[in-house]
Amino acid sequence: MPSRGKDDLEVVVVGAGAAGIGAAMRLAAARVTFAVFEARDRVGGRAHTIADAPFPLDLGCGWLHSADRNPWTRIAAEAGFTIDKTVPAWATQSFDLGFSAEDQAAFALASRRFHERLEAVASNDTDFAAGELLEPQCRFNPLLNAISSYVNGVELNLVSVQDSNRYADTGVNWRVAEGYGAAIAAQAAGLPIRLNCPVTIIDHRGTGLAIETALGTATADAVILTVPTPVIAAQGIGFRPELTDKAAVASVLPLGLADKLVMAVDTPEMLPMDGHLIGNPNVTATGSYHLRPFGRPLIEGFFGGRLAHELEAAGPGAFFDFAVAELVELFGSGIRARLRPLVETGWARDPFARGSYSYALPGHADARAALAAPVDGRIFFAGEACSRRDFTTAHGAYLTGIEAADEVIGLRPRRI
Ligand SMILES: Cc1cc2nc3c(=O)[nH]c(=O)nc-3n(C[C@H](O)[C@H](O)[C@H](O)COP(=O)(O)OP(=O)(O)OC[C@H]3O[C@@H](n4cnc5c(N)ncnc54)[C@H](O)[C@@H]3O)c2cc1C
């Protein structure tokens, strides 16, 4: 085998998020000649812990969903990260503030019935929007939509019932005290990753692939593309010749939006550790507030769907103003002076994410498999949107990266 130069590779992985890092870990273990081209000046993608705040803060993924079978749980623990197994308080309202115990019980029942109707849709039934399963006039529909905006990044009228039913969740949710993003990024150490290297074109006309980037052109036998779906749909990375089918399936798997706002809170002992509040249970445009995460003097606000888009568009400080107004309604005006904004996200305006996590438009649940299908035995696709059962998550992304790398490695003896 002739030796290869720095820009003549067996495999190029595009994107160093959870999927790209997973693929790279596998390729490195198999001693493949490869490089990861990452557009940003950091690894991790939508997994991003910032360490310069008073505490490590996860701006993207924070929860090890399906933690009892989530591969990142073991990887993080083996790397010395602290796994926190505190049960999330999402279904509770601390002090019953603004949401009486009776109403919470009535909502829990309405939510259970909604999910029973959803799960009753047979896998061979036609696909339609989950919003059609809402009971007309039910007073809890706004809150069911708010919860969908956190979970799916969109309200229920845009959620495919078939896709939703395929999601696999063990119901076990843990966290990483030092940050989920930090645990994922730590795995990138020592891997051949080129930062500030946005890929612009993948030319697949010749016998080898030419990968054009801001730092020059590399050649490879195979590429594993892990970028978010809007980048493919909007041809932020172009193909020569064009892959119109891939752009089409990516466009029916858009990214929903979820944004976070972390606030410091004075006299935190007045709030329960790892408590939770819904800002206003009567409307869809409301935040979910995690009180004192890990017992820290913080409140983490979570905003989804249309509300998150509106607050991003309103400019810096809008998330904080909105959160303060909701918390003043619940606690009284005294809370205003106790809150200070630390950081807010803007995932929709981030050009290398363009949103938070993928959802399948009604009628398009099968698009995930279509997106994941390789082209020509040498252009492979990975990333959370390609996962059939663990989409939207960092572990789903990782597993698709491993799968794509295994396919490439399986093809390798024939290709070289
Ligand atoms: C606010 C928020 C909360 C979340 N909460 C959770 C949670 O609690 N638990 C959970 O499991 N998941 C959560 N997620 C989702 C999770 O973060 C993602 O599903 C996962 O990180 C996606 O990984 P990925 O590798 O598929 O994509 P990405 O992480 O987006 O990686 C793709 C990479 O490609 C790069 N890229 C883009 N364009 C180019 C280009 N042209 N050239 C080269 N590189 C490019 C990007 O910079 C990025 O690094 C959350 C996400 C957000 C935003």
Image (cartoon, helix red, strand yellow):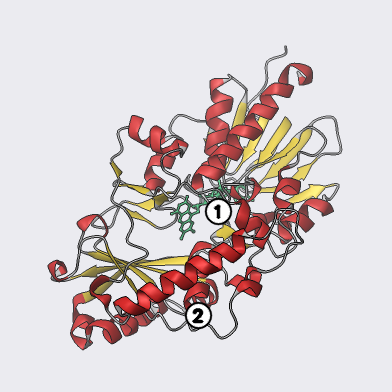
Q: Is residue 93 visible?
A: yes
Where does the image place residue 31, in percent across and percent down from the top left?
A: 58, 19
Give me the residue at 63% from left, 60% from top.
120
Labelled disc at residue 297: none
Q: Which amino acid, mark 2?
A: Pro
The residue that mark 1 highlights is 392
Judge left or right: residue 277 versus residue 375: left
Q: Quadrant of the N terminus?
A: top right
- How many other residues sit within 10 Å of disc 1, few (<14), some (14-19) or many (≥20)? many
Indicate yes or no: mark 1 CB to ligand 1 under 8 Å. Answer: yes
Marks 2 and 1, Cα distance to the nearest angstrom? Answer: 23 Å
Report the front residue among 191 and 376. 376
Residue 6: name its quadrant.
top right
Vertical placement of 383 versus 120: above or below? above
The percent coordinates of residue 81 (x first, y second) are 31, 38
- Residue carrying label 2: 142
Residue for point 29% across, 54% down? 52
Residue 376 appears left or right of 117: right
Nearest to the eye among marks 2 and 1: give it.
2
Q: Amino acid at mark 1?
A: Thr
